[in-house]
Image (cartoon, rainbow, N blue to C red):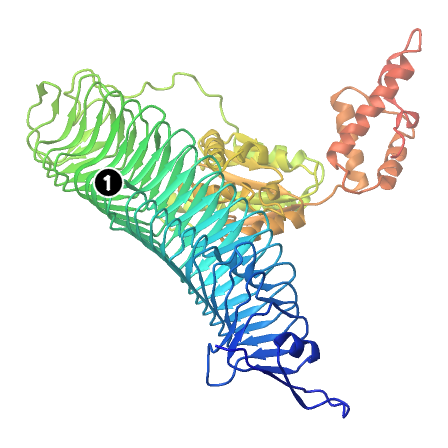
Amino acid sequence: MAQGTVQVTHTGTSRWRRRTGEYASLAAALEAAGDGDVLTVASGTYRENLVVERAVTLRGPEGSPGSVRIAPVDGVPLTVRASATVLDLHVEGQDSAAPALLVEEGAPELCDLRIVTRSAAGIEVRGGARPTVRRCTVDNPGGIGIAVLDGGGGVFEECEVVSAGQAGVTVRGGAHPRLERCRVHHASGSGLSVTGEHSGLEAVGCEVYEVKGTGVQITGRATAHLTDCDVHRTTADGVTLDTDAVLTLADCRIHDIPENAIDLRSRSVLTLTRSTVRRFGRNGLSVWDPGTRVDANQCEIHDSTGDYPAVWVSDGATAVLDACRVHDVPDALFVLDRGSRVDVVDSDLSQVRNTAVSVSDGATAQLDDCRIREAATGAWFRDHGSGGTLANCTVDAVQTGVIVTKGADPTIERCTVTSPAEAGFYVSAEGRGSFHGCRVTGSEGYGFHIIDGCRTTLKKCRTERCSRGGYEFAEDGPVVEDCTSDESGGVRSAGHATAPAPGVQKATQTVGLLSALPDQRAAAPDTETPATPRTSTDVLGELDTLVGLESVKREVRALTDMIEVGRRRQQAGLKAASVRRHLVFTGSPGTGKTTVARLYGEILASLGVLEKGHLVEVSRVDLVGEHIGSTAIRTQEAFQRATGGVLFIDEAYALSPEDSGRDFGREAIDTLVKLMEDQRDSVVVIVAGYTSEMERFLSVNPGVASRFSRTITFSDYLPEELLRIVEQQADEHEYRLGEGASEALLKHFTALPKGPAFGNGRTARQTFESMVERHAGRVAQLADPSTDDLTLLYEDDLPELP
């Protein structure tokens, strides 16, 4: 095809300019054109390296798409450095060291371009360029399809990379493009690759497939957001994240992957929402290393084509599944290694060929309100240090509901196992475990089968219609309390059969279902005589002796009265109003928040609301760990220490700093919210801190504010109240204020700056301590001091104002 001509239509208003002109070369036409001019290129092949540096329109002839070829021998065929419009061109490049289309500046519009090349990149965007690229195709078997580099950006709409010798789309160097309804396929590298700090990618309605490598790869602190995208038919993993990468997948579909559908490592974070993972050869989700985390909500993982677990979590990583479905897989969840953790809420695990939940090597699994069915084993806690909690879960149509072995020690609460083929709960090989309020119905074997002398704890459990018996225990076996069964064939221990017992049989410490088991013992009672608790009147009396805090005292008394009247109404057979006992204390330091919290706990204990009423004081450092998994563990341990009393969290707003980003304090808040609900009858939580910061803290999590009944504000002390604190301190330590000292102290506290460093009651006590030190320096010089000398504090003993 011969080179044609270029017609330039000028849009300028000057009468000195020609309205139109024709040029034999594109370079000449571009030189003559001004901003806003239209360059219409005649059909033909142009062996030129074009540089567009003005806001012109460059287009092929109407009705002949693709008839204009820009095909130089080497170099960059087309460079755009302005907010120009380029339409209907066919660009060919042969230089393996240069891109076919380079966009360096401006916000050009590039539409309906076809780039067929063997260049370093089909389209390269760099620097401050922000092009809009529509309906363009890139065929580049020699290099990258589309490269956005060094801070570049732009929007790519309905574009297609039909082949690439390397990655289909590469983003690096702080670039941040957006892809809309694009297709990337037949790439020999990653389909989408994003790497480097501050680099990011947004993709909506895109498809990545037929890739000889990984479908989507995010690495090196890069971020990406994919919405309504498909990734399928790769030769490697579907999606990989590595080294602090952050990815959000919403309404996406990852399928037909021979390796891991999604693989995360090295502190990467994935948020997965309303997405589907199916037909994968290895793991659906593979999560490794401390700090690595997956949060999946309303997702489905199913139809594994290999023999690997659907969700694999190890080496200290964390996975959270909320309202998810995992089915038709060899194993559903596999969590192993100390520090690794899986939290599953309101999810379904079904049609599992082996084990639905497997926990080993010191890992932790927490399942709440989940449903497990059609599995060989519902949950298996395998070895020492492995544990967690199953709460309010149902397990149906399995071989065995829950297995505990080799020193594992989970907590199973209010769970039901229906129609197991072998046993509802099986414990052996030094397994432990606590089973509270659990139920087994329709077992073809035993309900609870506990052998090898395992010291398991059963409380308020029940079995029904179990073919071989409700409970089968070894001698010197579990600790059992208030367990029942409908079995009529008696209870079996290892080698011992008991006599039949009709109807419902109840296991207690001395009689009932388990009384015939040899050496069956409950936990030894606490023989230590507890100290006699004070009455609420006594504690409120101590509260009244505190200086100031009049509004606080009224609030506490009102709350106490509500609880006391509720208790009396219950005793009278009447309904009692529900009183939420968790509180927020706001105010400056030193205003008595910790002291009032201690007294509040003692009041609740005296009213029978709390078992002990002791105070456990913690702050951020006690709750937030170095990685995500340890935060939940620390928070749970703090709750455990506070059981029966008050958990007082000082400076609670530090759990949600304003620039939190990926701060682990959010996990502590989420854990607190859940524990406050789960243990609302055994622990009272008080959060405290500055007023404005606490308002922000309560707004962080929708569940936080709803957990607290009221906020009590501790006002700063007035100068007269600070004086009274000093007087109390003096009296307690056998000092007296000499003539003029009280007036001087009042003036001192009035003039004292009330900035952030002001400590209220703490400042008053520090003032008293300073007076005592100065008094000692003065009196030490006296040879024979009198009693007055030793006890009287004067104005001269006051410290100087800061």
Q: Residue furthest top?
A: 783
Residue 242 visible at all: yes
* Horizontal arrangement in the rendering, residue 83 relative to residue 261 (left or right): right
> Residue at coordinates 57% horizontally, 50% vertically from top-left?
698
Say which quarter of the image contains residue 392: top left
| In front of the other: 394 or 400 | 400
Near-viewer residue (501 or 240)? 240
Q: Amino acid at mark 1?
A: Asp
* Relative image position of residue 587 (x, y in whole percent): 68, 44
**In the figure, residue 331 lies in which quadrant?**
top left
Residue 194 higher or lower than 42, as above or below: above
- The residue beneath circle 1 is 307
Residue 690 is situated, as x and y percent measured from the top left of the image, at: 67, 45
Q: Is 441 placed left or right of 164 in the picture?
A: left
Name the residue located 26 percent from the left edge and 33 percent from the top edge: 380
**Residue lying at the far bottom of the rendered structure:** 15
Q: Residue 499 at x, y = what percent?
A: 6, 24
Q: Secondary structure at mark 1?
A: loop
Give left or right: position of 635 versus 425.
right
Residue lying at the far front of the rendered structure: 2
